[in-house]
Image: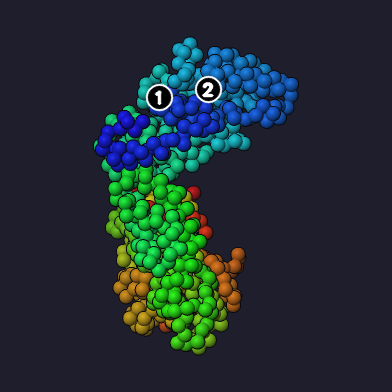
Amino acid sequence: MAAGLPQSTLGLLGSADALEAILQPLLHPANGLLDPSGIRISPAFTWSRGDILASMGGMQVSMEELMAEARSQAQAEAVRQFQVAREAFSDRRFSESLEALGRALDIGPSLQVAGRLAWRVHLLRALVLLGSDDNADPGLVNPAEAEQSFLLAARFARKDYRLDAARALLGAGWAAYVKDTGAIERRLANALAYTGEALDLDGDLSEAQFQSAKFRMALGEVDPALRGLRWLPVSGAILLLKAAADGDFRRHAGRFDSFVDGLRGEQQVKIQDEVTPVARRIRSWLPDCPDLAALPAARRLVDFSENAAGLGLLELQGYLGSRWREDREKLQESFFEARRMVSREHHGPVPEQVPAGDVPVDRPAGSQTADPMDQEPEFQFFNGLGEVLFTYRGAPGSRKVYELPAGDGVASLPVRWIPPGQFLRGSPVTEPGREPDETLHPVVLSQGFFLMETPCTQAQWSRVMASNPSRFVGPDLPVEQVNWEEAREFARRLTEFHRLSGLIAAGWRWDLPTEAQWEYACRVRKPGVYHGPIDSVAWYQQNSGKRTHPVGGRPPNAWGLHDMHGNVAKWCLDWYGAYPSETVRHPSGPPFGTFRVYRGGGWSDEAKCCRSAFRGRSVPEFRSSNIGFSLVLSGPLGSEDAEEAPKAAGAGRPTLPQSSR
């Protein structure tokens, strides 16, 4: 396959040796019914991967399991005929296979009520009729009949076996494409419709994602076709190779190569953001950490980072998709030993180690082993290696920009990376303005997240929602007069738009921050009432002039976040409830309640209501010109989601649906 690629495309995808390594596992005998032919591009269904074929028609299911599905003598006879058919199919005796399948179908209504058995018979019949490199007898091959058999198979599987039904519809799409009757436009329209149904049943079926892209390319719909390839997982590397060698894609070779080059650039950016900082830290620590220097994962990671600029897309994807995770796991095992070595270098012997994610114990003032969050060298190390190894998305406070749906005015949504860490939530009893519900307690957030740089503006709101409810109107003013549910609806629509655009992956979503996320980001891990003098960092009752002000007009905190104090209060995800006194991890409030929380205070509030610890609350239906919101973008808690990280901006821009799913 690689030998037929232009040198320019081959260079973008990777070296010949790297592509051979990708293809080699697919030649395993257990991986496909048709052996190496399962990965060749041909005008028949062997264009598809062998493991898809092997899973079809019960080709790998034991006779005992098949017979257990029979509920009558007639169905048992159908199973016996199916066994004859699949043995003949495996031996390339396709005419005998078709005859046995005909006998199975002749048992009539008894077969029709045996959903899975009927699925197997119709699906194997469709495979015979579709033909292959080994089955090209014009007296047997009939793609039009194969299409109908695939559709019958999907019908019998749809209710209880969605994946089986999706694979059958995938076959129907291919049969519609290769049959020689009817106009090509009509055949392609049917092929796309069947493949779309397959994706509706199983959106993760990468073969269907690719098949849809191929059909769109055949219709000349180049941009939608290439966007479809963006969704292929790293495990779908073979499908990207197929696209490179496929005739429909080669007719638009320049556009395809530009697309691959863009994906390669995105991977390079991801490496710079995620891998390179880890590699730099490891290289700097190697002289002080012999155990780390001897770890193959450390050397491999450093070598990959230093050589990534010369690698092809599939080589980059291969490392980021699996080996990166494996190397991080090995490095995590050595995390504490590395910390001990560096701690000795900076501060001398450390009598008591602080486990990652636990709040350090109090120590006497002036101690060499003081809280690592208060000593800069130890702070940098403790958070540095922990961040890059566990959920690194960039330097703390680093900025990313996401696109908004098409429309007038502002088109972007800037966010800041908030790294994982720990802090004390609430307020000490000596804090002026303190409320009884601000019990001071340790909180651990072991997963980072992105937070909007400013409260949501009216311009940003209008790009997603149909109306502007604000009392004080202006594109750069924060949106207000939105209740809790409307803020979450904005988040749901934004999530849907960015998933359709390919900018965030499954598992990532926009939502309101939890109280813990908001206060942690507001404080930047540090204690204190505000992040600066109240009159300089906040619009509040004493200086607001009884109205909101354009966002970002006051200095940001250390992570680049504006208007954390004042201008508008910000809705949070949590139900209101009492704080605990002990350490909590990833708190998200009580499971139910009467009031939702909002934080940060607004233009009409007193200074004490703008404190980092203050907890406002109201019913979810409440609207006020004093309340707006910011959103977080986060992945599934505790996931190893390097491959699911939000992608760089620059994908296509589908229009936003008018209502969320």
Residue 51 seen in the figure: no
Where residue 170 sits in the image (x, y, percent)?
48, 31
Q: Nearer the viewer, residue 313 or 507?
A: 313
Could you tell me which residue is drawn at 31 percent across and 56 percent down? 411
For label 2, the SS is: helix
Is 565 located above or below residue 366 in the figure? above
- On residue 42, the disc is 1
**Quick one: 542 or 305, which is closer to the camera?**
305
Q: Marks 1 and 2, Cα distance to the nearest angstrom? A: 17 Å
The mark tally for this picture is: 2
Residue drawn where x is 44% and y is 26% of the image: 37
Task: Give the vertical position of 403 relative to 313 (above or below).
Answer: below
Q: Nearer the viewer, residue 6 or 547?
A: 6
Q: Give x and y (percent) for residue 625.
A: 41, 71
Q: Tag 1: residue type?
A: Ser
Q: Is residue 283 visible?
A: yes
User: Which residue is identified by label 2?
Assistant: 126
Dot 2 amino acid type:
Ala
- Render colour scheme: rainbow
Decide which of tag 1 and tag 2 comes sooner along the chain.
Answer: 1
User: In the rendering, at what x and y percent does residue 3 appear?
Assistant: 32, 31
